[in-house]
Amino acid sequence: MTYQSVNPFNGKLDKSFDEISDAQFETKISAAENCFKSWRLKSYADRAKIVAKASLLMHERVNELARIMTLEMGKRIGEARGEVQFSSDILAYYAKNAERFLADVKLHPSAGEGHMESSPIGVIFGVEPWNFPYYQLARVAGPHLMAGNVLMVKHAGCVPQCAIAFEKLWIDAGAPVGLYTNLLISHEQSNRVIDDPRIKGVALTGSVAAGRSIAARAGKNLKPSSMELGGSDAFIVLEDADLDHTIKWALWGRMYNTGQTCCAAKRFIVVDKIADRFIDKFQNALAEVKAGDPLDEATTMGPLSTESALVDLLKQVDVAVSNGAKVLMGGKRVDRPGSFMQPTILTDVKPGNPAFRDEFFGPVAMFFRVRDEEAAIALANDSDFGLGGSVFTRDLARGKHVASRIDTGMMFINNLSWSDAELPFGGVKNSGYGRELGDMGIQAFVNKKLVRYVTAEAPL
Ligand code: NAP
């Protein structure tokens, strides 16, 4: 059984869902292809009516949608409501701006005239993760539907009710059959979906392992793909940082969504002069965090998404320790029912320790003390990942200089305000390729077509 809603707060199974049969898939993809034939011809204004309506419904259903998410993957209810509202905003943003983003671009050839136009390419297949069960879906649905494509999405096995609730938004918004289709399918079926000639592009957000498999499959089929993968972002603290301000972001950056964020602060790289004061305050702040019911507004730390996520994270910590890391705090599961991990700090993680290059997807921080700014930059760049990162300093020019030298897709100075509908999101190296959100996010699956008009006779 691939699709199961299990509440990680108490381990109770709520519902299971069967994968669809090949015959059911055939019906769905035929409907999607059929839908594309008319959807591609609709004006932006007509498309926007459906997308804006879905956005409005999300806004109206914020409590209901947030509760489903909290019960399925343990996100604290306040964060869950914030995610639903943000997802609604993303849909509204593309309903409003898509036409501008995809407007014809005039060219200036040596003879005659020309322009580039952006046309949709067909049915896009999305594969999405559980950590932001609606936001990840909105990030693909808003841009790609407004561009005139249609979408089929395989969501993660542990959030089937979120997947179904999101699909229902489109049905209730009056979307034509086939515009947005949730697929409850296995990995093996997913491979066959990528092979299907009716699928024209593949968007994945997930782990590096999934990226290697899905990008390879898309590549074999010569289909464009975008890969939003993992990260092990550096949180650099320079000696002139405002420490109180920095600690608040450090805590939020590691603990938001119980540490299960691709671009969370994972490697805390602190210049020697301020390192003792930083680690002292950071440790005290983490010690204040208490495990509790994610439906309770007062809870400061929810469970991890699943029991298997917790078991994997505990194993990763053990491997780190057996390779020389020291546990400054935490390192164990919380002694209570539910899939809770203690807030943890690892020190002495040296090159050669698997942890040095791994992503910890939960409340586990790695702490590194470095000599100076130059050493901080070198260590930040000594990573297979390249998603985001941050630098804390009172000197903005210095912050910008450091940000420019870090090999990632995103850098934040004195903040970790990761995501905004307007801002392109994505990474380099093993963190993937392509960008979602902003203007760039809508360009991923459109045909950039050249049209040239010249009155010249053909050369003899
Ligand atoms: P995951 O195991 O890779 O799963 C992500 C999605 O891919 C799920 O729907 C999963 O389905 C599917 N999947 C995995 N392997 C597949 C395969 N071989 N064929 C077809 N589908 C496959 O990742 P996760 O543990 O759920 O999510 C956490 C990862 O996502 C972290 O590494 C995180 O950093 C990354 N992430 C990146 C971003 C970004 O924007 N860069 C954002 C959020 C998360 P099943 O659930 O059925 O296995």
Image (tube, grey):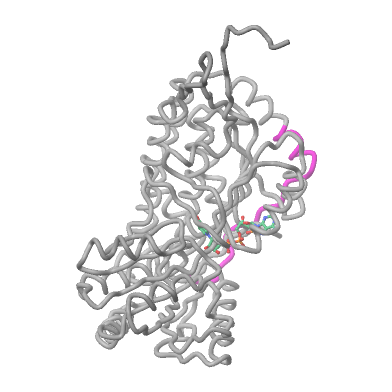
Magenta-span inclusion, residue 260: no
Q: Residue at x 60, y 51 (%)?
A: 204
Direction from residue 219 to residue 45 in the image, left or right: left
**Quadrant holding the N terminus:** bottom right
Q: Residue at x 37, y 41 (%)?
A: 89
Residue 366 coordinates in the image, percent (x, y) = 43, 80
Point out the stretch of residues depicted in magenta: 9-29
Q: Residue at x 38, y 72 (%)?
A: 301
Q: Quadrant of ligand 1?
A: bottom right
Direction from residue 31 to residue 138 in the image, left or right: left
Please tell me in which quadrant of the rendered image residue 70 appears: bottom left
Residue furthest out toward the front? 460
Residue closer to the observer: 279 or 167: 279
In the depicted structure, whether residue 346 falls above or below residue 65: below
Magenta-span inclusion, residue 19: yes
Residue 385 coordinates in the image, percent (x, y) = 53, 66
**Quadrant holding the C terminus:** top right
Direction from residue 425 to residue 372 in the image, left or right: left
Residue closer to the observer: 114 or 436: 114
Residue closer to the observer: 254 or 159: 254
